[in-house]
Amino acid sequence: MARRIDVTGAGDVRLAAWEFGDPPKSDQARDVPQGAHPVPAPRPPGSGAAERAPGVLLLHGLMGRASHWASTARWLSARHRAVALDQRGHGQSDKPPRAAFTREAYVEDAEAALEQLGLAPAVLVGHAMGALTGWQLAAKRPDLVCGLIICDMRASALGAASQREWEDWFKAWPAPFATLSDVRKWFGEDDPWVERPSRARGEFYAEVMQESPDGWRPVFEPEQMLESRETWVYDAHWEELAQVRCPTLVVRGLDGELGRAEAQEMVRVLPRGQYAEVADAGHLVHYDQPDAWRAAIEPFLDSVLTDLSG
């Protein structure tokens, strides 16, 4: 089951939020018609956050989409109300040509989603750029966030050379692709950025393609992705990381983009940081190794529940 709920983000950009699975019976959430803003059901006198599992908001990375979290959201839904957000410019959310693709806009979108969906205080789970959005929101609005999971996102500045590499990479795509099989093969095998064949990577990119009259093209605009990336790639984000007060788990794939030394420094900087790593995983940790990813984060989620009930 996949259920869509519309959210109004910063600048009135329409965002698509998704539930993949039935909400837990202990949750107070009610079915909400598409396009409506859900209002949390009233709780009995004396009830509180400690008596229910916190909501979870899942934030994909650059070029991703909510459906990349489907397997995670389904097992989470046994205990949590888990919602994945198509962020602005991604998936089925709006892609206005003159919309802001700033850090502030992405953070305000996630803030609006938590409030309009009635999820707060919630656990934020973010991959790559979505993780940065998560920790920036946790620093800005600690009242909305009771836990944070950062998946394979660096706190250090990546610099101008990295942005130029991305610009060149987009130009190298042989788009439009004739078939989805061609998409899978190029991103999983032929892409110069692929160090070794990766079926998961091919599937990941096939999921963000749509059929057009001349073949298969991405659901996003590459220019908007570069614009989004430009707003964070030149800066370091250690100061905001240090302002995150809730329990935070930093997760990396052993072959991902976040190195062990930097990940452990992030844990040191975080007031309540913890560390986990997933073997045989690259950057797409949750998509590449879903079972190992679950094993890495489930104990942390359990500890957040314990803290809330303690």
Image (tube, rainbow, N blue to C red):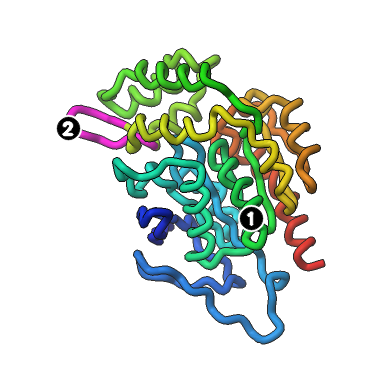
- For this view, does 185 lie left or right of residue 254? left
Q: Look at mark 2 in the image and give the residue it sits on.
A: 213
Q: Which residue is mark 1?
A: 123
N-term mark: 1 or 2:
1
Above-or-below relation of 71 to 182: below
In-image side of 146 versus 6 (left or right): right
Left or right of residue 11, residue 237 in this image: right
In the image, is residue 213 part of the stretch drawn in magenta? yes
| Image quadrant where residue 95 sits | top left
Q: Residue at x 56, y 32 (%)?
A: 284
Q: Residue furthest left?
A: 213
Residue 249 spot, x, y in % from top left:
72, 44
Identify which residue is drawn at 73% across, 53% down.
Answer: 246
Q: Nearer the viewer, residue 288 or 284?
A: 284
Q: Please tell me whether residue 304 is drawn above or below residue 233 in the rendered image.
A: below
Answer with the quarter of the image where residue 270 lies. Answer: top right
Label disc, if present, on residue 207 of the rendered structure: none
* Proximity of marks 1 and 2: CB atoms separated by less than 8 Å: no
Q: Quadrant of the N terminus?
A: bottom left
Does the stretch in magenta take in 90? no
Main SS, magenta residues:
strand
Which residue type does callout 1 highlight?
Answer: Val
Q: Identity of the amino acid at label 2?
A: Pro
Residue 93 location (% of width, % of height): 36, 49
Numbered disc 1: secondary structure: strand
Label 1, label 2: how many angstroms apart (C-alpha)? 41 Å
Residue 70 visible (yes or no):
yes
Magenta-highlighted residues = 208-217
Q: Residue at x 77, y 32 (%)?
A: 265
Crowd class of label 1 (few under 14; some 14 to 19; many from 20; radius 10 Å): many
